[in-house]
Image (tube, rainbow, N blue to C red):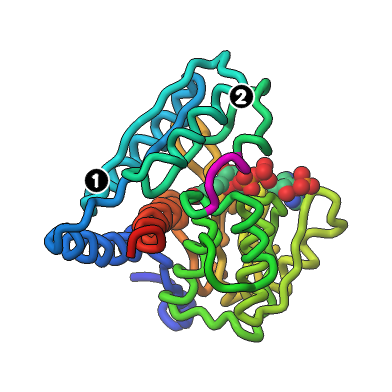
Amino acid sequence: MPPIGFMFRRPHRQEVLDGRAVAKQILDDIATKVGARVAAGKPRPKLATVIVGDNPASALYVRSKQRDARQVGIDSEDHRLPTETSTEQLVELIAVLNRDESVSGILVQQPLPNQIDLVQAVIAVDPIKDVDGFHPFNAGLVAQGLPGGVQPCTPTGIIELLERGGVRIEGANAVVVGRSNIVGKPTALLLIKRNATVTICHTKTTNLAAHTREADILVAAAGRPNLISKDMVKPGAAVVDVSANRIDGGQVGDLGPGVEEVAGWLTPNPGGVGPMTRAMLVRNTYEAEIRRRP
Ligand code: NAP
């Protein structure tokens, strides 16, 4: 027999923002579209991946991206360059892939070895094949809220999860913890485009908790386990846990224990943003093909 207080306590309602389920819907949709194109005699889209060096995590990420692509009928080809590759050699390979008619999208897996100039590598990719959406041309379109271009994978995946999960973005106070060019900043920009009022926090933010407690939508992308404790979350808020921190062979995000007791919507981690990021990459590859060869 549970205690009386337990019996009469109003159950805490929470929606799980299930990235695996939403990603599956998106991938199924693309599989249908790819199937129809191929049946009509058009070429299969193709994703070219480039890894420099032998970082096992990069190899794992790329394998799972290729698997997702294959699952929907998108071909993939894998390019491996040795750790000591120069910027010029990498840019040369990217130029070959830019010219290759059969390649729809190019993914250069990060991190790159220190001797490589990351900016040179990013701008070497033809913006139309930039399926990560990292090229300044595509990032600039997002910054200006303009259509066209390639949407960044993780930020777009976050927005899709929120929207499909029934979270109202317009008018919400959104707080993004993290200001990187690939996650924090573009996520903030996509939220602004959807009429949220956005605050971006980082390591120089004074009193992080004062900001997060005001958040109707809280996006944690700091890469710091336990950074967001239960008392930093507004009851009923939608909490998106982006980070993929590796601990004891497993993955944890930035949320501390008990956040699930107060959040109104929550992304599981793993199984939240990660599958959405990969689904967005597959969608970007398909869309890159359509834009180049309608
Ligand atoms: P990043 O480049 O290291 O950026 C981290 C950001 O968090 C920085 O802006 C940093 O502030 C801020 N930050 C760090 N500690 C903080 C603290 N104590 N308080 C407030 N802000 C703090 O990382 P990223 O590439 O954006 O990725 C963030 C996390 O998301 C990582 O764990 C990464 O593995 C994960 N991730 C997941 C996916 C996915 O698909 N699930 C995709 C991409 C990334 P400063 O700017 O002041 O240094």
Indicate the secondary structure of the residue bearing disc 1: helix
The reply to whether callout 2 and callout 1 are in contact (CB within 8 Å) is no
- Badge 2 crowding class, 10 Å Cα cut-off, few under 14, some 14 to 19, many 20 or more, is few
Residue 124 is one of the magenta-drawn residues: yes
Q: Say what amino acid the circle numbered 2 marks.
A: Glu
Of residue 255 and residue 261, the one placed in the foreground of this image is: 255
Q: Residue at x 59, y 58 (%)?
A: 138
> In the drawing, what numbered circle is on residue 70?
1
- Magenta includes 282? no
Give the residue drawn at x 28%, y 60%: 27
Q: Quadrant of the N terminus?
A: bottom left
Residue 58 relative to residue 42: left or right: right
Tell me if residue 258 comes above or below residue 262 in the rendering.
above
**Residue at position x 32%, y 44% in the image:** 102
**What is the span of residues highlighted in magenta in the rendered image?**
122-127
Q: Is residue 13 visible?
A: yes
- Circle 2 sits in a helix, a strand or a loop, which is it? helix
Above or below residue 173? Residue 286 is above
